Image (tube, rainbow, N blue to C red):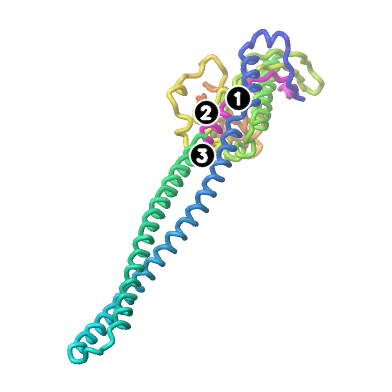
């Protein structure tokens, strides 16, 4: 049974827990990620509109360019027609020397009309070229605005990642008081003190695991964080713990109910790893602070051996057979793995983070 509950004593011992909770409540009131999402939606709409404008402007420019090509072709044809009219008029002038009654009026009109058509075409080409120039300038301005909007969109996406990282980093730096109960089986050779120590240790361990699960569950991006949890150090600290009720319940079963104050102090890149983004969003100068060595930083440790039905004892506490996963505080621990007919594995190991201890049991030479 595990409940969130705050005792007056633990509240007095943990003023930082209260301030952390208040900050979290204030953060929930205004979510910067949601604000950036709104800006992203607006920016995407702006980009969609400017893209439609760009397509329309490009189509208009293409139309003007096609019209220019048409006017150029027509201009060449009109010039040829004018040249033919001039040639015909020149012939009529030659005939006039032989026949004064030769008619020039119709040929002069044809030549004048051809010239007028050429000039009209040239004017149309100039107007169309001016329109092309203006259209090209307009399209260039649209493309510049597109580039600016795309750059602003990229910046907003970058800001969103930074805001997500800050949000989950804040959510990870949480504190809570948990009431946890645990029943352990004490060996008949253990003293009352050893049995009590084992019960307290295992109850605290359960509290750490429970707090970790609840911490992950309450994250804004909980599903994604759980998918990327492998290898992430959350560093759950047991800041204080007090027994509430304990006692034997028969068959060497020892029951303990405890209240523990816990806090997560995750590694600097934890938020980035949980969100599966580049660690550059997490590695800043302020992240160089070193955690207080007096705090108990817990890590998941797996013990495996090449034998079945063996027995694992860590720091004098029996945990059962391998494969076994336990949460241990950082530091030195005495690990013993034994089995009848085999030489015991007895080592002092140093735990700095999540790790796996591989054990190979050798047959007893006397057997």
Q: Secondary structure at mark 2?
A: loop
* Position above or below: 335 against 195: below
Mark 2 in CB contact with mark 1 (< 8 angstroms): no
Q: Quadrant of the N terminus?
A: top right
Number of the front mark, 2 or 1: 2
Q: Dot 3: within a 10 Å radius of its alpha carbon, few (fewer than 14), some, or many (20 or more) residues?
A: some
Task: Specify start and end residues of the magenta stretch as a single range.
Answer: 160-189
Seen from the viewer's position, the closer of residues 155 and 145 is 145
Measured from the top left, where is residue 185 in percent x and y? Answer: 73, 24
Q: Secondary structure at mark 1?
A: strand
Residue 77 appearing in the image: yes
Q: Distance between the Cα atoms at labels 2 and 3?
A: 33 Å
Badge 2 or badge 3: first in the primary sequence: 3
On whether residue 132 falls in the magenta region, the answer is: no
Number of the front mark, 3 or 1: 3
Residue under label 2: 353
Looking at the image, the residue that sits furthest to the front is 101
> Residue placed at 77% from the left, 20% from the top?
255
Mark 2 in CB contact with mark 3 (< 8 angstroms): no
Measured from the top left, where is residue 95 in percent x and y? Answer: 21, 89
Residue under label 3: 157
Badge 3 or badge 1: first in the primary sequence: 3
> Residue placed at 22% from the left, 86% from the top?
91
Q: Secondary structure at mark 3?
A: helix
Seen from the viewer's position, the closer of residues 192 and 189 is 192
> Residue placed at 50% from the left, 24% from the top?
350
């Amino acid at each position: 049974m595990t409940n969130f509950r705050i005792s007056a004593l633990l509240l007095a011992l943990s003023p930082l827990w209260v301030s952390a909770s208040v900050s979290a409540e204030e953060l929930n009131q205004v979510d910067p990620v949601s604000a950036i999402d709104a800006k992203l939606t607006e920016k995407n709409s702006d980009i969609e509109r400017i893209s439609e404008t760009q397509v329309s402007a490009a189509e208009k420019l293409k139309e003007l360019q096609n019209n220019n090509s048409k006017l150029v072709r027509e201009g060449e044809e009109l010039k040829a027609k004018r040249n033919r009219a001039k040639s015909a008029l020149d012939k009529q002038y030659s005939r006039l020397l032989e026949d004064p009654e030769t008619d020039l009026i119709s040929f002069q009109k044809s030549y004048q009309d051809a010239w007028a058509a050429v000039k009209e075409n040239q004017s149309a080409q100039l107007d169309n070229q001016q329109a092309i120039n203006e259209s090209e300038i307009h399209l260039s301005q649209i493309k510049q605005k597109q580039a600016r909007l795309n750059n602003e969109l990229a910046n907003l996406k970058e800001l969103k990642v930074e805001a997500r990282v800050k949000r989950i980093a804040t959510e990870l730096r949480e504190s809570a008081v948990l009431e946890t109960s645990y029943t352990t089986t004490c060996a008949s050779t253990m003293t009352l003190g050893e049995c009590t120590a084992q019960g307290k240790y295992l109850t605290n361990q359960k509290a750490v695991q429970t707090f970790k699960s609840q911490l992950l569950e309450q994250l804004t991006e909980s599903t994604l964080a759980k998918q990327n949890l492998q290898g992430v150090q959350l560093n759950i600290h047991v800041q204080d713990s007090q027994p509430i009720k304990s006692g034997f319940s028969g068959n060497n079963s020892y029951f303990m109910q405890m209240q523990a104050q816990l806090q997560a102090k995750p590694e600097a890149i934890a938020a980035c790893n949980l969100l599966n983004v580049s660690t550059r969003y997490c590695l800043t100068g302020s992240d160089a602070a070193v955690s207080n060595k007096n705090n108990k930083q817990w890590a998941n440790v797996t013990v495996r051996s090449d034998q079945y039905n063996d027995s694992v004892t860590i720091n004098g506490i029996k945990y059962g057979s391998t494969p076994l996963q336990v949460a241990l505080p950082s530091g030195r621990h005495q690990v013993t793995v034994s089995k009848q007919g085999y030489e015991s594995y007895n080592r002092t190991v140093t735990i700095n983070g999540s790790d796996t201890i591989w054990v190979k049991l050798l047959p007893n030479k006397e057997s």
